[in-house]
Image (spheres, rainbow, N blue to C red):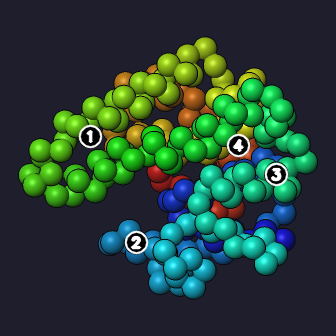
Amino acid sequence: MIVVHHLNDSRSQRILWLLEELGLPYELQVYQRDAKTRLAPPALLAVNPLDKSPVITDGPLTLIESGAIVDHIIRRHGGGRLAPDVASADYDLYQQWLHYAEGSAMLPLMLNLYVGRLGEAGAPLKSRIDGEIANHLSFIEHVLDGRAFFVGDALTGADIQMSFVPEAARGMGVLADYPNLDAWIDRMHARPAWQAAEARGGAYGVGR
């Protein structure tokens, strides 16, 4: 049985969504952020020394990192669903998006979050960070032009992995300039499996 160690308002929302799309049974351990600091509670350290979520256990295996978890669940438990055939060109694009979400797209958004807390001390970096955010969101906006999903004509793990990017961008107030991406994340949030994940994991406030 897969156990998801789920931190509210975190990337682990994607993992709940994935499991609901696949209709897989799972157990849920929920952790709440500190209301003032927004940090994860110390209890999460017992599972992940980095005190971050998502974390899953699947039998004797413990995995961190959203992309690795999405890939593992789909390969080991998906039964051929939510991923292109490994021999197809679409599979390479699928792998690209699994890595791009956190490897490239989230970096300027996270820099914006942390540098913004510095106030005037962070001002010299603002234009460069804003430019990088615009660069990545414009790239994704172009990719989604005329497309319902990132790969092929149906939902894959690539869509699930990419979902946190527009959610974070919306939370920072910069998503409205990218209508394709803005509409795409609304469609993802409207999926029954996404809503089932929120019902089970608790209210999700990122980009809502």
- Judging depth in this view, the residue of 166 and 59 nearest the camera is 59
Q: CA distance from mark 4 to mark 3?
A: 10 Å
Residue drawn at (49%, 75%) of the image: 51
- Judging depth in this view, the residue of 195 and 115 nearest the camera is 115
* Residue placed under numbered mark 3 in the picture: 75
- Residue at the far left in the pictured view: 120
Q: Dot 2: few (<14), some (14–19), or many (≥20) neighbours within 10 Å?
A: few
* Quarter of the image that includes the N terminus: bottom right
Residue drawn at (36%, 28%) of the image: 135
- Give the residue type at disc 1: Ile
Q: Quadrant of residue 170?
A: top left
Question: Residue 77, how many percent across, how many down?
Answer: 86, 56
Residue 129 shows which numbered tag?
1
- Judging depth in this view, the residue of 27 and 77 nearest the camera is 77
* Residue placed under numbered mark 2 in the picture: 39
Question: Residue 128, how many percent across, how many down?
Answer: 22, 37
Q: CA distance from mark 4 to mark 2?
A: 27 Å
- The image shows a total of numbered marks equal to 4
Q: CA distance from mark 2 to mark 3?
A: 32 Å
Q: Earlier in the sequence, mark 3 or mark 1?
A: 3
- Give the residue type at disc 3: Arg
Q: Dot 3: few (<14), some (14–19), or many (≥20) neighbours within 10 Å?
A: some
* Residue placed under numbered mark 4 in the picture: 157
Vertically, is 183 above or below 57? above
